[in-house]
Amino acid sequence: MYGRSVAKTLTRAVIAAGLGLIPGAAHAIEGCVESLKQQAISAGVRADVAERMLSGATYDEKVIRFSTSQPEHKTEIWDYMAFLVDAERIKDGKANLQKHSRTLSAIESRYGVDRHVVLAVWGIESDYGQFQGDFYTPHALANLVCAGSRRKDYFRGELIKTMQIASRGDVPLDDFRGSWAGAFGQTQFMPSTYNSLAVDFDGDGRKDLVNSVPDALASTANFLKNAGWRNDRPWGYEVRLPDGYSGPSGLKSRSSLATWSKRGLTKIDGGRLSGNLEAALIQPAGAGGPAFLVTRNFNALRSYNASTSYGLAIALLSELVSGGEPFKTPWPTDNPGLSRAQRLELQKLLNRNGFNVGEPDGKVGPATREGIRKAEAKFGMPVTGRPSWNVYYALGGR
């Protein structure tokens, strides 16, 4: 849920200083954090909880840097999909589908949300609970309040809600690990979303989205149900357009499948579109890439993170873990993106070739991008810093 209600712009002086700490900011954040403790206590947070959760909060350059760049909005969709819907995530999804079959079946029965979709959200958001985030979320939120965000009032509210959740005993104080923007748990709920939609599905009296798989998955199903998901319609279809198509497109232009058929569209396998189900045509990579007719179920996926790339990643992963097939139309590029395993190997290759990027971990941060830029320059490629197949191959990847 990283993309919901996050700050778009932060203090330009911080960025201009190479994302370093601007003069006086250390003192400023310390005073701000002390004020936040008092505000939290006034809002009903136990004093010991406020003290423990905010003590030690200091300026975090990564929070500020990440808040200015959301990958689902700035990354080419073929890079985004290659990273999120890779062979490893599909394999692990199928294993978790079996492991948690009874829980997922019960959740689907209660909330009317396809188990494969719930599983896919879990897989995309935290790799099935294996990685819930780099940040202690109270400290990340304190940075967004104190270090320059234009949405400081919003983040202040989320921070206080986080501490209220801890005060109630639903989630242990030290377990709030999550995103730079304050989302936490196995399916990454913002605290305000937690308050309105989290559920106690395992019956222990606590809504623990960090340590309880049933609570996390059921809460996600409850979110999608409230966002309008209905199991009696698909998320959408990959389609083929007639040559020279110039008709309506975009999420706001909805028509029945029968109407789309009259415009010359077919399912990607040539099957006929029919019926009154309304759908919208999207072409996320432009006219040369895949095209999809998407229903309001796709809107429910996008409400989890307001990004078409994100919605398609969930949709595709849900199809693949259920035994379905990948998209048929290739992305319009001759330089595709890399899977997580390939990104890890790329870092090893960069180090081996003298472009030191530090300890390989598969995460493409500033050091890796700088190493890629140097490698691209050496090989006479356009200098982008992008983890692409071309630079991977040039370094010896196969």
Image: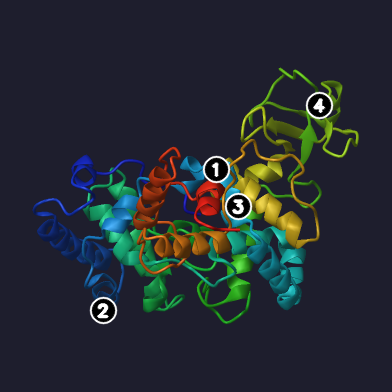
Residue at left offset 60%, top offset 69%: 128
- Alpha carbon of mark 1 to alpha carbon of mark 2: how far? 39 Å
Which residue extends farthest bottom?
204
- Alpha carbon of mark 4 to alpha carbon of mark 1: how far? 24 Å
Residue at left offset 84%, top offset 23%: 264
Say which label, 2 or 4, has the lower sequence index: 2
Q: Quadrant of residue 8?
A: top left
Question: Residue 335: image x %, image y %?
Answer: 58, 42
- Alpha carbon of mark 3 to alpha carbon of mark 1: how far? 16 Å
- Alpha carbon of mark 4 to alpha carbon of mark 3: how far? 30 Å
Helix, strand or loop under label 1? loop
Of the pair 98 and 45, the residue shown nearer to us: 98
- Could you say which disc has been placed on residue 82 in the image? 3
Q: Residue type at mark 2: give it.
A: Asp
Q: Residue type at mark 3: give it.
A: Ala
Task: Decide if residue 358 is in sight here.
Answer: yes
Identify the residue position indicated by label 4 in the image: 260
Identify the residue position indicated by label 2 in the image: 48
- Residue 325 sits above or below residue 185 on the image: above
Q: Residue type at mark 1: give it.
A: Ser
